Image (tube, grey):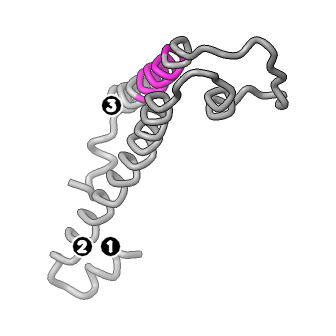
């Protein structure tokens, strides 16, 4: 029911959404950190960056990084593509609900 946003969104649901987003962030960070632990690094390395980004640290590893790259790109696809697909689905439901309105005045009011 996309047009009933004010009824559906209550403080409990907002809190749950925040909690779920925090848990997803923590699990992603923990996964990436644990994946870094399995890599071995050469002894004489200079890190040319002030901020040790995950991708740059994986590139500095001397061991095989295929699994790390696979997990990193899959997580980026999941964490970026999932919300994008949800937004597109939500907007499609809104547009289909508005198209179901029979009067032209109702449609223009809903679109505005």
Q: From the viewer's perspective, is residue 88 above or below residue 106? A: above
Dot 1 or dot 2, earlier in sequence: 2
Q: Are marks 1 and 3 in contact (CB under 8 Å)?
A: no
Which circle, 1 or 2, is nearer the viewer? 2
Range of residues picked out in magenta: 21-34
Dot 1 or dot 3, earlier in sequence: 3
- Whole-percent x and y of residue 65? 52, 28
- The circle on residue 110 is 1
Which residue does the numbered mark 3 point to in the structure image?
A: 13
- The circle on residue 3 is none
Which residue does the numbered mark 2 point to in the structure image?
A: 98
- Whole-percent x and y of residue 75? 43, 36
Main SS of the magenta part reads helix
Q: Are marks 1 and 2 in contact (CB under 8 Å)?
A: yes
Q: CA distance from mark 1 to mark 2?
A: 7 Å
Residue depicted at x 49% and y 14%: 34
């Amino acid at each position: 029911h996309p047009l009933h946003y004010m009824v559906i969104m209550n403080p409990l649901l907002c809190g749950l959404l925040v909690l779920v987003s925090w848990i997803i962030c923590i699990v992603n960070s923990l996964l990436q950190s644990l994946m870094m632990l399995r890599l071995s690094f050469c002894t004489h390395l200079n890190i040319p960056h002030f901020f040790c980004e995950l991708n740059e640290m994986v590139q500095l590893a001397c061991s095989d990084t295929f699994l790390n790259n696979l997990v990193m790109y899959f997580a980026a696809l999941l964490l970026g593509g999932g919300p994008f697909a949800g937004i597109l689905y939500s907007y499609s439901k809104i547009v289909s609900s508005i198209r179901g309105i029979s009067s032209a005045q109702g449609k223009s009011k809903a679109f505005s």
